[in-house]
């Protein structure tokens, strides 16, 4: 019997939902329940973890474990207490094989594509100084749960594990592969060490088991620091995607500057628009639903990629090739598209010192719509 | 009229209107803002600050899942003339005019920039860095959606 776990694709998760969950996850600390050691005789095991190790850090992997353990993200509590007997009950043969696991979407963006798999090499069962650390982090606890399960498979170290096969990498750069191997080793070592300690720990603890990588300090502080730094760089990466024009900066400083500028200009824009709004009466029948209704007309007359997609009432074809499916298109607006473009750029240009800014922001907003399609 | 009818016939609506978070946010935002503006107009005493207040209020109300919106609401309710987003203009100019982004003093520079960023975000100064970075992400997104909504309101009305 193949124990297949269908992991609900996280593409349906909205970023808000995830955010609230992630915040609540951090607040949950009591979910650690050490599993009893169960000796398993699995045959071909899938210690295959559906994790894309390309961009992953310790943190991401842990979160992915969390996702794995908890297919329905809506009830994180239920997932955490997955009974060991239940999980290990059947055969572990190829468990976890096929579901395409999407890494947790931090902000609604998947970081994983495809169906990557990785089997953790279990051949190194060295018990070199497992490092324990008290940490208020449920995600990593679940990582430990996972590792314990893997430990049990380790008992019957089959053929499947000795190869540290890392398949289907998104970008198989040598550096990332090496990183993955290190992490694989790290995780595997954690597994092996956990197995001996599982029996002793039945009570809930807040420990995470972290192994230092090769050539790195094993100090508790530095490991905490490392995790923290990974979190921060992960967030910075996301911000880089969010803020247009950030990709040309490789350093944190430049990116931060760019982000700051962007936020400030957005705020100024809003301020300006609200000043304009003070002068203007909003139409009583202004309806946002109309704005979000996509208008598809057969005969294209003018094609104007206006950033906010407020098109005229004339027949035209909407340029939405790269855009999300919900575009702004009001049936009530009767602007000539060209005129509308002029009016939109004029006030902004007089507001901004830099006359180039409006067009830049317009294209930025277009990018925004492109990214909204997630 | 005819064109409008033609357009309406061919309008395509999304089947899942509540799934797309940006649509949800924008809808909420406009549903807060437009009536508030109408009320303001009726009172005939709409100064720019009041409109700004309403704009910010609508933003805060539409994004209640996020921490920064709580801070924003607090600020708005505590002061009648909030200057939440206007205070940073001067700081912004300073940053824009900085000659070069030096990689040399990156360490110290980063700290300073993070502090700047914290100042921009409502409530950012009470958060730690990781939280702040996540919150900035969705704050940016909401600001972008807000600009879109405001633009469409303004254009719709002129």
Image (spheres, coloured by chain):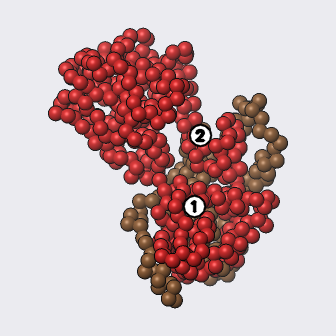
Residue B38, by quadrant, is bottom right
Q: Where in the figure is residue A176, as x and y percent of width and height?
A: 51, 27
Q: State left or right for residue B107 relative to residue A65.
A: right
**Front-most of residues A7 and A370:** A370
Who's the residue at 41% across and 67% down the image? B14
Quick one: label 2, few (<14), some, or many (20+) residues within 10 Å?
many
Q: Can you say whether A220 is above or below A72 in the image?
A: above
Q: Colour of chain A?
A: red
**Residue assigned mark 1:** B145
Who's the residue at 45% across and 45% down the image? A110
Q: Where in the figure is residue A254, as x and y percent of width and height?
A: 70, 40
Q: Where in the figure is residue A237, as x and y percent of width and height?
A: 57, 40
Residue A326 visible to the viewer: yes
Residue A259 visible to the viewer: no
Who's the residue at 65% across and 45% down the image? A246
Who's the residue at 78% across and 61% down the image? A355
**Residue assigned mark 2:** A236
Q: Can you say whether A103 is above or below A288 in the image?
A: above
**Inter-mark Cα distance, 1 to 2:** 21 Å
Q: Where in the figure is residue A153, as x and y percent of width and height?
A: 26, 21
Chain letter of mark 1 equals B
Q: How many marks?
A: 2
Residue A64, by quadrant, is top left
Residue at far bottom of view:
B1
Q: State left or right for residue A242 relative to residue A268.
A: left
Quick one: label 1, few (<14), some, or many (20+) residues within 10 Å?
many
**Front-most of residues B4 and A83:** B4
Q: Colour of chain B?
A: brown
Chain letter of mark 2 equals A
């Amino acid at each position: 019997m193949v124990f297949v776990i269908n992991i609900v694709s996280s593409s349906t998760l909205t970023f808000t939902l995830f955010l609230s969950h992630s915040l609540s996850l951090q607040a949950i600390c009591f979910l650690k329940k050490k599993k009893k050691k169960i000796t398993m005789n699995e045959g071909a095991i899938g210690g295959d973890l559906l994790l894309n190790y390309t961009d992953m850090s310790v943190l991401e992997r842990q979160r992915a474990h969390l996702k794995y353990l908890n297919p329905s993200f809506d009830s994180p509590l239920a997932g955490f207490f997955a009974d060991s007997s239940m999980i290990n009950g059947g055969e572990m043969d190829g468990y976890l094989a096929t579901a395409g696991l999407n890494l947790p979407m931090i902000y609604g963006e998947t970081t994983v594509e495809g169906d990557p798999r990785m089997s953790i090499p279990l051949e190194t069962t060295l018990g070199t100084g497992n490092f324990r650390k008290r940490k208020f982090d449920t995600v990593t606890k679940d990582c430990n749960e996972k590792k314990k399960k893997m430990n049990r498979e380790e008992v019957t170290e089959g053929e499947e594990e000795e190869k540290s096969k890392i398949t289907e990498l998104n970008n198989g750069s040598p550096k990332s592969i090496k990183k993955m191997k290190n992490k694989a080793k790290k995780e595997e070592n954690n597994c092996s060490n956990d197995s001996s300690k599982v029996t002793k720990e039945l009570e809930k603890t807040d420990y995470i088991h972290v192994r230092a990588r090769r050539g790195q300090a094993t100090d508790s502080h530095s490991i905490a620091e490392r995790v923290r730094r990974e979190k921060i760089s992960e967030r910075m990466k996301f911000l880089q995607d969010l803020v247009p024009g950030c990709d040309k900066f490789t350093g944190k400083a430049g990116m931060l500057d760019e982000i700051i500028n962007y936020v400030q200009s957005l705020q100024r824009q809003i301020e300006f628009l609200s000043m304009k709004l003070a002068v203007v009466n909003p139409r009583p029948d202004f309806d946002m639903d109309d704005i979000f209704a996509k208008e598809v007309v057969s005969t294209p007359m003018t094609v104007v990629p206006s950033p906010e997609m407020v098109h005229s009432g004339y027949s035209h074809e909407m340029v939405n090739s790269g855009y999300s499916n919900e575009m702004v298109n009001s049936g009530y607006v009767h602007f000539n598209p060209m005129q509308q473009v002029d009016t939109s750029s004029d006030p902004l240009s007089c507001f901004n010192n830099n006359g180039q800014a409006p067009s830049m922001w317009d294209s930025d907003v277009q990018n925004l719509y492109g990214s909204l399609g997630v | 009229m005819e064109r409008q009818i033609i357009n309406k016939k061919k309008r395509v609506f999304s089947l899942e209107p509540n799934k797309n978070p940006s649509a949800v946010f924008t809808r909420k935002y406009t549903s807060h803002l437009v009536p508030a503006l109408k009320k303001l107009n009726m009172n005939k005493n709409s100064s720019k600050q009041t409109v700004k207040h309403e704009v910010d209020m609508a933003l805060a109300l539409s994004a209640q899942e996020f921490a920064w919106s709580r801070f924003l609401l607090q600020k708005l309710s505590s002061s009648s003339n909030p200057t939440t987003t206007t205070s940073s203009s001067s700081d912004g100019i300073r940053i824009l005019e900085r000659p070069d982004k030096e990689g040399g003093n990156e360490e110290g520079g980063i700290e300073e920039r993070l502090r700047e960023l914290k100042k921009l975000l409502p409530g950012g100064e009470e958060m730690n860095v990781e939280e702040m970075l996540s919150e900035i992400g969705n704050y940016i997104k909401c600001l972008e959606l807000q600009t879109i909504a405001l633009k469409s309101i303004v254009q719709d009305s002129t």
